[in-house]
Image (spheres, grey):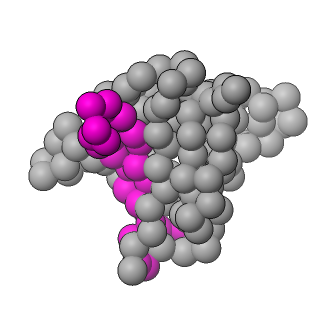
């Protein structure tokens, strides 16, 4: 059974919603940061830290894309954006999905990406295992 993690934008988050292109841009920025770290260490850290390439399919246009692995230890992760309505409020979210044949490495990288993005956006993170992490300012 596939597992999902959600980064939910709540009151106090740095952004209120996100497009698919903005999510792709943020993941590319993450990879660039890893490359700079690798340059300082004299090691190609971006390939180890982000062993995926972003790919889209026609049926997922404007809804989702997937991260296809460039290393045999990993397979792929599906990423998308959406929104849910509870009462009168509409909350936007980013969803990362691990398909049934995903590896343990995919799950670890998915958690890593989710934590990075949720911290950056000060959002509420619902992990693959059902636990919740709060990076948003709460009172």
Q: Nearer the viewer, residue 124 or 31?
A: 124
In the image, residue 74 sits, relative to residue 66, either above or below, namely below
Would you say 21 lies left or right of 14 here?
left
* Occupied quadrant, residue 134: top right
**Which range of residues does the magenta coloring cover?**
74-101
Query: Residue 62, image x and y in percent?
Result: 20, 37
Q: Residue at x 39, y 73 (%)?
A: 2
Tell me, yes or no, if residue 51 can be seen here: no
In the image, residue 61 sits, relative to residue 70, either above or below, namely above
Query: Residue 69, image x and y in percent?
Result: 48, 60
Tell me, yes or no, if residue 43 can be seen here: yes
* Occupied quadrant, residue 92: top left
Q: Residue at x 54, y 74 (%)?
A: 103
Residue 94 sits inside the magenta stretch: yes
Q: Nearer the viewer, residue 123 or 49?
A: 123
Query: Residue 6, image x and y in percent?
Result: 47, 50
Q: Quadrant of the C terminus?
A: top right
Q: Residue furthest front?
A: 87
């Amino acid at each position: 059974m596939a597992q999902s993690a959600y980064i939910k934008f709540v009151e106090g988050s740095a952004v209120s919603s996100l497009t698919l292109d903005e999510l792709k841009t943020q993941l590319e920025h993450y990879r660039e940061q890893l490359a700079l770290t690798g340059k300082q260490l004299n090691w190609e850290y971006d390939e180890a830290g982000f062993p995926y390439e972003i790919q889209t399919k026609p049926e997922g246009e404007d809804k989702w894309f997937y991260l296809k692995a460039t290393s045999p230890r990993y397979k792929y992760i599906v990423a998308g954006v959406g929104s849910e309505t509870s009462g009168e409020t509409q909350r936007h979210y980013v969803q990362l999905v691990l398909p049934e044949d995903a590896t343990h490495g995919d799950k670890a990288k998915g958690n890593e990406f989710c934590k990075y993005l949720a911290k950056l956006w000060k959002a509420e993170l619902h992990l693959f295992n059902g636990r919740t992490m709060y990076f948003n300012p709460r009172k």
